[in-house]
Amino acid sequence: MSRMTRPGRRLPLILTFDPEAVAFARDTGAAVVHDFAYGDLVFDGRQPRSFLAEPGARDVGVELFSMSKSFGMAGWRLGFVVGNEELVARMTTLQDHVRAGIFAPVQQAGIAALTGPQDSVAARVRLYEQRRERVLAVAGDLAAPCEWTFYVWMRLPEGVTHERLLAEHRVVVAPGEGFGPSGKGWARLSLATPDDVLDLGLERLGDAIGG
């Protein structure tokens, strides 16, 4: 019996990838769960790297992937998990009790997206990267480094709040507090916003933080 199945033991889950995660999981019996939903959306010529590419990763963890980010299939509720056979089997058992299955045409669409031309993914990455540059040009040093995903985090200047942005400048941003205590004083901006709306919002945001 492996340490992952030892009765009566509550195991930690590692939710972020680190090269030392495999060794830690092997030494402690932890299970690594790597969320790779944004794996394709990396900028500046960087290449995505699966957690499972790390030697020994398949022995201690699994990786989750969603069709919503790379292929714009948000709302389709389609994704998959790969990796450690035992952990995948546990997730399969859980899913059997909470879901009836995924509509077959949606599954076929997912297969087509994964096995077909990937031009749309590359185009999506370029679009988000271009929008990121426009956001950074306005946010400047207030923005956190953004090397992947379609979000930019921005620290709000003194005296600027989410409420004031909405009431005085008609700009809506996602409050950082909604993502945990460390998000206090920050805002999250989405790059999955149409260009005309994004540019208008950035113009107003520039007026708000510039003043």
Image (tube, grey):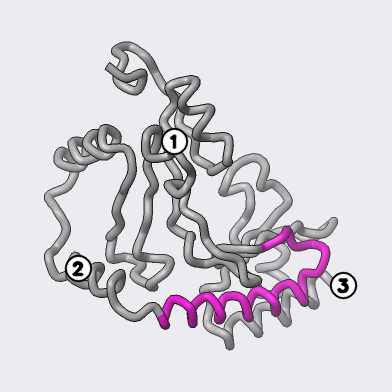
In the displayed structure, would residue 88 be above or below residue 210?
above
Q: Earlier in the sequence, mark 1 or mark 3?
A: 1
Q: Which residue is mark 2?
A: 106
Q: Which residue is mark 1?
A: 32
**Labels 3, 2: front one:** 2
Q: Is residue 28 left or right of residue 211?
A: left
- The reply to whether residue 173 is in sight is no
Which secondary structure, mark 2?
A: helix
Q: Which residue is mark 3?
A: 211
Residue 15 badge: none
Give the residue drawn at x 29%, y 20%.
5
Q: Cα distance, mark 1 to mark 2?
A: 28 Å
**Labels 1, 2: front one:** 1
Tally of numbered tags: 3
Q: Is residue 3 left or right of residue 205?
A: left
| Residue segment shown in magenta | 119-146
Q: Amino acid at mark 2?
A: Val
Give the residue drawn at x 46%, y 53%.
50
